[in-house]
Image (cartoon, rainbow, N blue to C red):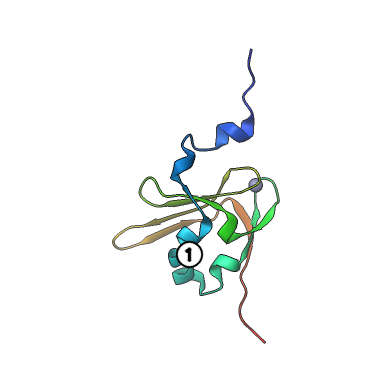
């Protein structure tokens, strides 16, 4: 019996749907300010801290899905509807956003 690599199972099947985290920059900056894409996200699944711009982004479907670059699991889901923005940060335990303070 074959054992699938769990990391592979969690990934979307088509890599060509992957964008980089900067693809989500506009949406994230509208929420968190201009430092959003250089902010650091800690993965809730594997604990890896990485720049939001490094999160793999998939745009198929009604919104954006950002995945951990280490384990491939979902970090952030973002869906903009006409009257509401849905933001799911369930896959992130911490988001460190530069505030630009001096
Ligand atoms: Zn992870």
Point out the residue furthest to the bottom here: 102
Point out the residue furthest to the front here: 16
Q: Foreground residue, 47 or 37?
A: 37
Quadrant placement of the N terminus: top right
- The answer to whether the residue bearing label 1 lies less than 8 angstroms from the nearest atom of ligand 1 is no
Residue plotted at (65% across, 50% down): 44
Mark 1, Cα crowd under 10 Å, few <14 / some 14-19 / many 20+, is some
Q: Quadrant of residue 84?
A: bottom left
Whether residue 14 is situated above or below residue 94 in the rendered picture: above
Residue plotted at (64% across, 28% down): 5
Where does the image place residue 64, in percent across and percent down from the top left? 43, 52
Where does the image place residue 86, in percent across and percent down from the top left? 42, 57
Where does the image place residue 80, in percent across and percent down from the top left? 36, 59
Q: Number of numbered discs present?
A: 1
Residue plotted at (43% across, 66% down): 26
Q: Quadrant of residue 39?
A: bottom right
Where does the image place residue 38, in percent across and percent down from the top left? 60, 67
Q: Disc 1 on helix, strand or loop?
A: helix
Point out the residue furthest to the left here: 82
Whether residue 82 is situated above or below residue 101 in the rendered picture: above
Q: Is residue 44 left or right of residue 36?
A: right
Q: Where does label 1 land, which residue? A: 25
Quadrant placement of the C terminus: bottom right
Whether residue 3 is situated above or below residue 88 in the rendered picture: above
């Amino acid at each position: 019996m074959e054992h699938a690599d769990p990391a592979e199972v969690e990934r979307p099947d088509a890599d060509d749907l992957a964008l980089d985290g900067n693809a989500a920059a506009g949406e994230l900056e509208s929420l968190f300010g201009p430092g959003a894409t250089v902010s650091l996200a800690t993965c809730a699944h594997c604990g890896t801290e990485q720049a939001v711009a490094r999160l793999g982004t998939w745009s198929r479907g009604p919104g954006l899905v950002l995945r951990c670059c280490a384990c491939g699991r979902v970090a952030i889901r973002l869906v903009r509807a006409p009257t509401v923005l849905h933001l799911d940060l369930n896959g992130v335990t911490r988001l460190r956003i530069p505030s630009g303070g001096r």
